[in-house]
Image (cartoon, rainbow, N blue to C red):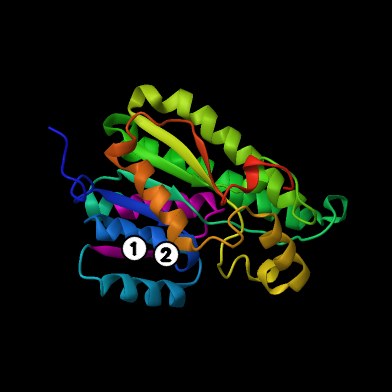
Amino acid sequence: MTPAVGTELQDRVALVTGATRGIGYETARALISQGCRVVISARKEAELAVAAASLGALGKGVVLPVKAHAGVLDDSVRLVGEVMETFGRLDILINNAAANPHFGMTLDVEPAAWDKTFEVNLRGPLFLIREAHRAWMGEHGGNIVNVSSVGGASPAPGLGVYDITKAALNMLTKQLAIELGRDRIRVNAVAPGVVRTEFAAPLIANPTIQQATVDRNPLGRFAEPKEVAEVILFLVSDRASYINGAVIAVDGGLSSGPGL
């Protein structure tokens, strides 16, 4: 029997990285609203405490904050270990944490900035998925969503290094979808356009970039974090049980036509 809408995620355990604000926070909130037990992770302990208090005030699910750096392997091992020690399972993984320390010509990037971008945006998701697979999902199945970007499908001025990591993340998503499907693990990605978050604030604050972005978008506006979170919520639900290896654009139609 198909579960009633709003009950199918009850008591499942979800881990959301980069969850103190923006898409990560809204995704954690959406999962909690469905009765999930949610682990939120980020680098800054003070921000984690604030986010956990705010999410806990919803009164609809258990929230566990765990300080961890998305690009550090030892942190990923410890993070999954804490999830398993506390809850004994891990059903949902949302790889949302991202870094973009370089804005400008790709050839001008410093090696340290290049390495950090790949460390957080690509290596981090890979090894966190590996730990989740080893700890629980390999035997019990699960759902994984990687937060990519519309830039992973089309280049944009100034964002070359970031976009390259997101293009690779899209391929990682598809590769793992075919490798892990037999383990009853679905791996998908969402590819937002510009979302009104602190992460995108430098773009939104630039009047020229802001106007050009809005003018090119068929809906004529930026996305709100909640709009991306709702797509993620659908992908990890049983309503999306036959969606695997997809990279779903959440960009107002920007990637559907000319002018990216």
Circle 2 — which element?
Answer: helix
The picture quadrant where one finds residue 38 is bottom left
Amino acid beneath label 1: Arg
Magenta region includes residue 67: yes
Crowding at dot 1, Cα within 10 Å, few <14 / some 14-19 / many 20+, comes out as many
Can residue 74 be seen? yes
Q: Residues within 10 Å of mark 2 (few under 14, many from 20)?
A: many
Circles 2 and 1, Cβ within 8 Å, touching? The answer is yes
Disc 2 from disc 1: Cα separation:
6 Å
Residue 99 image point, x, y percent: 63, 58
The residue at the point 35 percent across, 45 percent down is 234
The residue sitting at the left extreme is: 1
Part of the protein shown in magenta: 62-83
Q: Nearer the viewer, residue 5 or 112?
A: 5
Along the line of sight, which residue is nearer the eye, 40 or 55? 55
In the picture of the structure, the residue carrying the numbered disc 1 is: 29
Is residue 8 shown above or below 193?
A: above
Three-letter amino acid code at disc 2? Tyr
User: What residue do we see at 46% from left, 29% from top?
Assistant: 177
Magenta includes 156?
A: no
Q: Position of residue 81 (x, y in %)?
A: 35, 50
Task: Please state the horizontal and vertical placement of residue 164, each as a whole percent of the image.
Answer: 71, 44
What label does residue 200 carry, if any? none
The image position of residue 142, as x and y in percent, is 32, 37
- 23 shown above or below 46: above
193 relative position to 59: left or right: right
Residue drawn 34% across and 36% down? Answer: 240
Residue 232 as seen in the image, left or right of residue 35: right
Residue for badge 2: 25
